[in-house]
Amino acid sequence: AAFLVPLTKITRSDASVAFAGGFNHEVNFSLALAVALIPLAINRSLSAWVRVAYAAALLIALLGANYRTAIVALAPVMIAVLLALVVRQIRRDQRLITAGLAIAGSIGLLLAAPIEIGERWAAVVEIVQNPDQAALPPESFTTAERRFASGRNYLYSVYLHGFLRADPTQQAIGHGADSWKAISGVYAQNTLLSYLYEFGVLGALCAVAYWLSLCWLAIRSWSRQPSGLIIMTLSMIVLNMSTMPMNLLQGLMLYALLGGALSYNALARKPAPVERTGRQSRRVMARPAVPATS
C-alpha cells in the first residue's frame, strides 16, 4: 500500500510525483531495485518465465520511482536483461522478429509510463547539449538557473570552482571528508566533483581506479560474465555522474554485490577439457578394417 502512495519532492518546481514506497527519496528506492537485479542476473535456478516476470516488475517499479538519473542509468540494463530472458525462450529462427517486437514494446512502455516527458526530461537534454554551463562561476547563476534540473548545473559549478580556487595542497588531497557542508547545503550530485573537492585529485583518481577495476574484471572474463552484470558495470559509472550512490547504504550494497559477482566469474577456473575415455578409444580401435579392393 505504501508503494501506491505518490510522493512529491519539495525541491521540484514541476509538481512531478514518484512512487517510492517507504523510502524517503527516489534514489534510495531505485538503488534498492538495482540491488535486486543482481541476483536475477546471476541466478539460473529459477524458471525462465519467473525471471521474466521478476525483471518486468523491477522495470515497472523503476519507472514508478521516477528518478531521472536512475532511469537513464538503470533502465537500459533492466530492459536488456528482460529482452535476453524472453528471446532465449524463442526458437532461433524466430528470435529476430521477437526481439524487434520486444524492443518496440519496451519503447511503448517507456512512453506510456507515469514519467514526465516534458520539462523534466527536456532539462536532461539541455544539460547534455550545454555542458559548459557548469563551468561558469556560481555567482553568475540567476535564481531560475540555480533551480534548473534540480540545481545540478549550479551545484556542479559550486564544487568545481571550489576545487579550482583552492591552493595546490588542497587540490591534491582535498578539503576533508564532509567539507562540502561548508559551501553548500546539498551534496554535489556527482561523485567525481565531490571527491575532487573533499579528497582532491588523489581521491578522484581512486574512484576512477575502482571503476576501471570493475570494467577490467568484466572484460577479463567476458565469456563467463552474465550480460546483465557487464551492462550494470557501465550503468554504475553513468549513475555516478549525476548522483552519488557510494554515499548511500543501497549504493554500497550494489557496489559490494556487483564487485563480488564480477570477481567470482573472473577468478573462477575454466572447466577442464573433455578427454576421450578408454572405452571410446577401444571402440575406435575395434572397428573392422575396410577390405582392400583390387
Image (cartoon, helix red, strand yellow):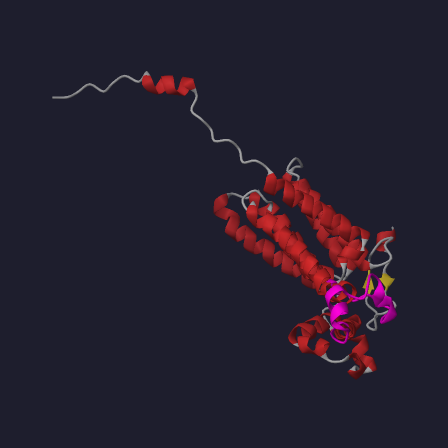
Residue lying farthest left? Answer: 294
Residue lying farthest front? Answer: 169
Percent from the top left, x then y, of residue 4? 84, 54
Highlighted range, magenta: 163-191
Above or below, 269 against 101 in this view is above
Percent from the top left, x then y, of residue 229? 64, 48
Residue at 76% across, 73% down: 167
Q: Of residues 91 and 239, which is closer to you in this image?
A: 239
Verify whether residue 182 appears in magenta: yes
**Residue 75 located left or right of residue 185:** left
Verify whether residue 76 appears in magenta: no
Percent from the top left, x then y, of residue 201? 71, 65
**Residue 259 located left or right of residue 221:** right
**Residue 136 located left or right of residue 96:** right
Q: Of residues 103 and 139, which is closer to you in this image?
A: 139
**Residue 187 located left or right of residue 168:** right
Residue at 69% across, 75% down: 126
Percent from the top left, x then y, of residue 96? 51, 52
For the C terminus, give its image quadrant: top left
Q: Is residue 102 visible?
A: yes
Residue at 80% across, 71% down: 150
The quarter of the picture where residue 133 lies is: bottom right
Q: Is residue 79 visible?
A: no
Above or below, 284 against 36 in this view is above
